[in-house]
Image (tube, grey):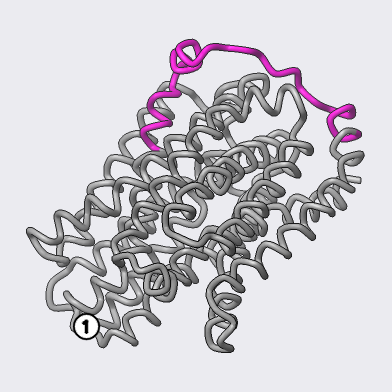
Amino acid sequence: MFSILMVIIYLAFISLGLPDSLIGAGWPAMHTALGVPTSFAGILTMLISGNTIISSLLSDRLTRRFGAGLVTATSVLTTAVALFGFSLAPSFAWLCVWTVPYGLGAGAVDAALNNYVALHYKGRQMNWLHCFWGVGASISPYVMSFALTHQLGWTSGYRIIGVVQLALTAVLFASLPLWQRSNAAGGQQATKLSLRELLALRGLRQQLTTFLAYCALEATAGIWAATFLAQARGVGIGAAAKYASLYYLGVMGGRFLAGIIADRLGDRRMIRLGATLILASLVLIIVPGVPTTVALVGLLLLGLGCAPVYPTIIHETPTNFGAANSQAVIGIQMAFAYVGSTFAPPLFGLLAGVVGVWLYPYYILAFALVMVAAVAWTNRLLPAA
């Protein structure tokens, strides 16, 4: 039963990744067709993130009432509706309206699935779960590219992914009995604590700091990699875009590799390994005078270092804060994660406009040091089990 359900969960996480890269892939065509500035993409991503934060904070209440399976299936259906809404939107204002279900669907399913896997599966499956998110995020740009190169328009790209989401929704609703039997076999009754009571849990505020810093680092590294290579390293624009994919390749491949060794090393060693690789990678990027090829190796290594951090911290949440509190805690963690990934990249853009894009590795290093300090503080407060 669990092996079949794990396949279903992996499919659900692919569906979570599918919408995430669509705006970036389609925006060059979308903003022209809608007659809005390029910068308006930031408005959409901020609105989506805001609604994702809301649904992350509500995920505990929803999951306690309806169960992880139903929350997951309904959330994927909600994002499918939003994707079709995007494809039919006659104006930018309507796109803003459809960001509401777009974001609400993502946050609840993210928190519900992460908690479910943290409770029922090992570190191996958690790392592979996040690897499958990368699969979904990688598929969508190809779908959008197909729609645009075959003169089908950006709206067709959204419709195609919407159809895929509907198919995944059908699979998820059909799988609900598996989720129910799994809960009956070993579920843990969740407690109902207020937000203030949750934040008072020993070590939680330190771990939330870790989440915010890590996600700020991860998002900034990916979004600004190509610009850094082109403007600070003198790489051609086309080549810079291609080489920036080394970071994402490192994240996806690193999570697959992390799944192989996670259970042998344990959660805390995996986090320390990831942090060490991140710091080493930034040395390769920062050191003046090194060839660009060395900086590219550093970018790949940065992705490998980032790979295990997020899923491993999620996986140790039930151990750190109790299985009964884990759904609520993971919902708050997701909210802080989205705060970091939403605001850190545009802040870097403002700083880069004043100081220069060369600031890129130093900005990332600052968040990495905060993350390392917060991890050490958390581990002191919460001794390993």
Give the magenta part as a residue range: 181-210
Q: Which amino acid is tagged 1? A: Pro
Left or right, 180 with reference to 261: right
The verdict on residue 225 being magenta is no
Q: Which residue is mark 1?
A: 291
Q: Is residue 27 above or below residue 111?
A: below
Q: Residue furthest left?
A: 354
Residue in view at x 61 percent, y 37 percent: 108
Examine the residues drawn in magenta and state their main secondary structure.
helix
Image location (x, y in percent) of residue 229: 25, 76
Residue 189 lies in what quarter of the image? top right
The verdict on residue 203 being magenta is yes
Regarding mark 1 in the picture, which secondary structure is present there? loop
Disc 1 crowd, CA 10 A, few/some/many (<14, 14-19, 20+)? few
Residue in view at x 47 percent, y 71 percent: 26
Image location (x, y in percent) of residue 278: 36, 57
